[in-house]
Amino acid sequence: MIPKTFRTKATWVTAFALFSLFFGAGNLILPPQLGFKSGDLWGLVTLGFCASAVLIPLLGILAHARLQGTIFDFGKKVSPAFSLGYSLVVYAISISLPSPRTASVTHEMAIAPFFETPPLLTSILYFALVFVFVMNRSKILDIVGKLLTPAILLILIAIIGVITFSFEYQFPDTAFGNPFTNSILEGYQTFDAIGAVVVGGVIIVSININQKQASYAEKKALIGSAGWLAGLGLFLIYTGLILSGALVHNAFEDDISRTGLLSGMATLSLGSIGNLFLSILVALACFTTAVGIVTGTSDFIRSRFHNSQKAYLITAITGCLLGVVMGQFDVSYIIAVALPALMIIYPNTIVLILLNVLPEKYASPKVFKAVVWTTIVCSIPDFLASIGSPLAPKGVILEWIPLQQYSLGWVLPALVVFLIVNAIGFWGESKINEE
């Protein structure tokens, strides 16, 4: 049993840490341009974006609170082999793409405007610091929660506050053909559903280290409360950034880039020191995300090698070296490389999160297997389309698969299979009970 005062403090520190670990490169550069293009439908776009960038990650944290394990536990009801394969793929993608992307964004927005240094130097120094934090992982919650997150929030609130109180609330027509689905898919680009599965394990380990006296129920309540607080914070910040982007629609050219828009918004709101504040924001947000990804990957590999500290060290070094290699490339290049992997792994991550949140009676091993494999099969067309394969479905096939034209063709098949398998299971149980 832990004292109430200490429990409240731990909840806020954990909530700050979760917010900061989620809030990385994509979370900064995506919402403003969404708002910029959303026009008078910025509210609908906010709901779509937050569905995939806030709600699903929040459910992922709640699933972690329930499981109190690692990423391996998310897929073990399908099979141990599947769970191991899924875990390895997620961590390989995480340390190869989203983690290096944080260094690339940091260079383009926080270093290049002020110093004429090569991106490779930025990448080397950046991941050297990441390595230091990863090797001092027991302090992650305190350092991230107490120092970095408040600084990020203050800078963001300043930008959003000035813009929302300075511009007239007049919006043009939306530039999106399908605002809600477009914003859902844009939320994919944050990698936050994957982040919830990855960094949630970091939080679990940190809590186990720092609060050994807490019971399972206390840890579950702490993680759940912190998750809701972090989710609320993300929702408010995303709403503010999207609204701000919509308000400045007349201040910039229509084809302005994501990073250019964010820089312009900082300059508009904070004047000559806007770029400096933005640089600090980008560096802090990106850095904490990279630390969370490399730490989570190292934790998982260590758990597969009987808690070997050597395995943790080797994985941390490997993750940082990959970050150095990939982090020197342009952000646009890393995003392009990441897209195919995103289209095949993200739907399965969403499904695993949802199934792990549901009560046991609705998420049996049979349900897990049927729904997950259905999702994998129905995600293949989106994957093929993302790599420009001639085998990608076109014309009549696209019309035959519901929501396929929105790259969401897996949703209805997975839902139907979920309902059918549960119905068959309940029918079988009723027959047995009658006998």
Image (spheres, rainbow, N blue to C red):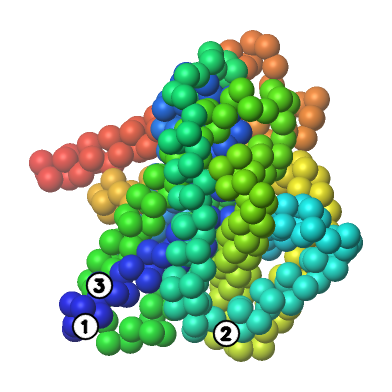
Q: Which amino acid type corresponds to the residue marked 2 in the rendered image?
A: Asn
Q: 10 Å neighbourhood of mark 1: few (<14), some, or many (≥20)? A: few
Q: Which amino acid type corresponds to the residue marked 3 in the rendered image?
A: Thr
Distance Cα–Cα, label 1 vs label 2: 25 Å
Element type at mark 2: loop
Which residue is the extreme one toward the top? 396
Determine which of the numbered discs, if any, sits on residue 8 in the image: 3
Residue 250, picture quadrant: top right
Element type at mark 1: loop
Distance Cα–Cα, label 3 vs label 1: 10 Å
Residue at left offset 27%, top offset 53%: 360
Residue 332 in the image: state x and y as whole percent.
77, 43
Determine which of the numbered discs, if any, sits on residue 136 in the image: 2
- State which mark lies toward you, 3 or 1: 3
Residue 94 visible within the image: no
Element type at mark 3: helix
Residue of label 1: 2
Q: Is 56 above or below relative to 170?
A: below
